[in-house]
Amino acid sequence: MTSTSAPPRSDIYLRTISVAAVNCTEPRLISLKTALAPHHHLLSTYSSLADLALGLLNDLFSCAIIYMESPDHDDDVMPRLIKSLAEVTPLIIIANRCDVSGAVRIMKAGAFDIIVGDPSPTALAPKIFEAIKISSKYVKQRILRAEALKRLWRLSPREFELVQLLIKGYHNKEIATQLGLSCRTVESYRKNTMRKMRVNSICDLVRATMDIDLSVTPPFLANNSDA
């Protein structure tokens, strides 16, 4: 899938501050709108983290607020999703319940803050504006990183693996052996991957991804095809 939308401009971003909310019930939506109302910030809502990830392919949010039951899971899916999304926008997690270990895992994954319970608008507003303030300081860097991440997120799982190996300096023959593919297939994947990433050389690819953690594959890449 290729996006035809133009990259977000920093001057537009600075004038139009938008906030994303995930899993927001009606009472929470009212509370959130009340917190944002004095500043007239835009609000977009999503039903899941995966939907937010898709939304980030086209929009650059100043901050995202994620409501959840609890981040206390034994699997690593939630921290992986948080890590991927936190590289694009500051995340505030609001959980109904959370123990210390769960909070530590989410904060280490890159969340900006975690709140237990339903905060009042007056308690939530300062958290949101603090995240927006930090976000706006690095708007140009965030736009460049967001564009690189958007391209990475459009890759298929196999293409993402290829990027990981190319960044490590692997040659086509080594990649073919590592992935169990023919050299011709690797060359085809490499051509498509470079096109999707909009780079012309390995040096360009390294520059585009140097500030992004490529050690973990975002779980929603499984929905992408190799086309």
Image (cartoon, rainbow, N blue to C red):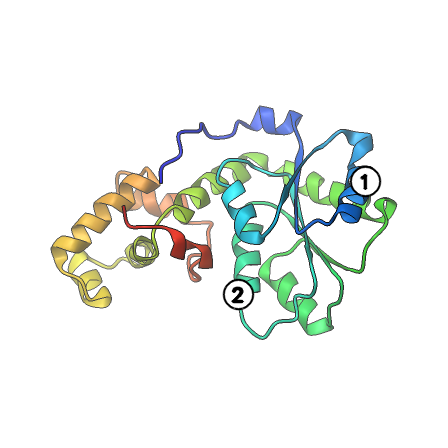
Instruction: Give the CA distance from mark 2 to mark 1.
Output: 30 Å
Is the residue 18 above or below the residue 65 in the image? above
Residue matched to label 1 = 35
Return the x and y of residue 196 as percentages of the image width and height: 32, 41
User: Which residue is depicted at the point 45% across and 59% down?
Assistant: 219
Return the x and y of residue 8 as percentages of the image width and height: 51, 30
Query: In the structure shown, which secondary structural element does the residue marked by tag 1 occupy?
Result: helix
- Which quadrant, please, contains the N terminus? top left
Of the two numbered discs 2 and 1 on the same chain, state the one appearing first in sequence: 1
Is the residue 55 above or below the residue 66 in the image? above
Question: Which residue occupies the extreme front position in the image?
Answer: 26
Q: Is residue 87 visible?
A: no
Q: Is residue 31 left or right of residue 112?
A: right
Is the residue 197 above or below the residue 166 in the image? above
Return the x and y of residue 197 as percentages of the image width and height: 34, 42
User: Which residue is depicted at the point 38% across and 44% down?
Assistant: 207
Quarter of the view holding residue 149? top left
How many numbered circles are shown? Answer: 2
CB under 8 Å between callouts 2 and 1?
no
Q: Is residue 75 left or right of residue 204?
A: right
Crowd tier of the residue under label 1, counting other residues whose Cα lies within 10 Å: few below 14, some 14–19, many 20 or above: many
Crowd tier of the residue under label 2, counting other residues whose Cα lies within 10 Å: few below 14, some 14–19, many 20 or above: few
User: Which residue is depicted at the point 65% across and 62% down?
Assistant: 107
Q: Amino acid at mark 1?
A: Ala
- Which quadrant, please, contains the C terminus? top left
Residue matched to label 2 = 77
Q: Is residue 42 visible?
A: yes
Q: Amino acid at mark 2?
A: Val
